Amino acid sequence: MSTADDAGDAGRGREAGGVLAWFPAGLPPAQKVIGLFAAKWAIGALRPLVLLGVPDLLAGGPRTAADLAREAGVDPDVLHRLLRAAAAVGVVREAEDGTYGLAPEGQGLRSGVPDGVREMFLFASDPVMWRPYEELPHTLRTGEPAFGRAFGTDFFAFLREHPATAALFDHAMVQNRYPGTDRVLDGFDFSRFPRIADVGGGRGHFLAAILARHPGCTGAVCDQPQVVAGAKEQFEQHGVADRATAVETDFFTSVPAGFDAYLIKHTLHNWNDRDAVRILSRVRDAIGTDLNARLLVVDALLTGPGGFDLGKLTDVEMLAVLDGRERDRADWDRITAAAGFAPAGEDPEPGDLVLLEFRPV
């Protein structure tokens, strides 16, 4: 039996979000961490449902587990238990008549819906993203990447060798809209820069969003050939195909010259400091003597000590999978200075996604 104080603590956690939302009421402080296990159990229930296409099957309205099982050719009791678990965490709704329907939080797990996260969820829960965590003790002892220990190669080499996983990754990155994305798009005056290069920009979805908001700008997405092959579709969807191009680029070797701004969004955190400086140095080479050009870094900016910070959690994924890191302001100023840049513009508040502006020196 929980005390009033215990119940109040659990209630406050659920209202505030964050990890406290999983804490069962009544546990003493030393045991509350076991509430984090629930995240694993929830993902374990949701992944097979999404792979099976259950959110799509529920798009037409509530159905029983038995009805869904007949259509999908699966075990009805197991499906019922997974749906019941998904309902417990609010992704589906379980009715008294035994039917299940999609909650608003589950709509994004359908195929092809606007602002959906289906591929992002499937990639994040894929074994390729889970297995490196088993090797984090090795990383802790040696500093070596956990992914290499798990798979015998680095993350990006693995993607080149596994096209299906690479395609899922590309789709996931298109869906990867952090809460701060719109704040960056709406809060920064990109119209200052007539020509914008999106370095490492994948299929160009962020560049396309910028150009759609600023009709006076043109731009190019610069990335690996197999990635930018999908850029034309993004540009056409945003109505900017006449102002955007795709340039095949290895940003460790060279970056195209002649742009007013060089944007690097959510890419540098994939790399350790040494490799990040290499990328930034190629941008500095491309800028050359044009001291009016700008480097625009869109990435996480870590907060100070204590408190919830999504970046401090995704930093663990950088350790496990990519040999990268999330950074605070001192980190960003240090690596950009090593490549020939100095801070410019306003100093943003820390957050999951911010824009940092730098000038060449």
Image (cartoon, helix red, strand yellow):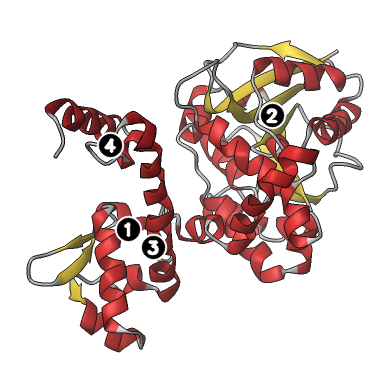
Q: Is residue 201 visible?
A: no
Which residue is most to the left? 96
Where residue 286 sits: x, y (%)?
88, 31
Q: Amino acid at mark 1?
A: Gln
Residue visible at 33% across and 34% down in the picture: 20
Dot 3 and dot 2 residues touching (CB under 8 Å): no
* Alpha-carbon span between mark 3 and mark 4: 26 Å
Q: Is disc 1 placed on a helix, strand or loop?
A: helix
Where residue 14 sits: x, y (%)?
26, 35
Q: Is disc 3 placed on a helix, strand or loop?
A: helix
* Alpha-carbon span between mark 3 and mark 2: 45 Å
Where residue 127 sits: x, y (%)?
59, 63
Q: Is disc 4 placed on a helix, strand or loop?
A: loop
Density class for disc 4 (Cα within 10 Å; few <14, some 14-19, many ≥20) is: some
The residue at which mark 4 appears reads as 27
Q: Which is closer to the viewer, label 3 or label 4?
A: 4
The residue at which mark 3 appears reads as 46
The residue at which mark 1 appears reads as 107
Which numbered disc, 3 or 1, marks the residue that appears first in the sequence? 3
Q: Quadrant of residue 303?
A: top right
Dot 1 and dot 4 residues touching (CB under 8 Å): no
Q: Which is closer to the viewer, label 1 or label 2?
A: 1
Q: Is residue 146 visible?
A: yes
The residue at which mark 2 appears reads as 194
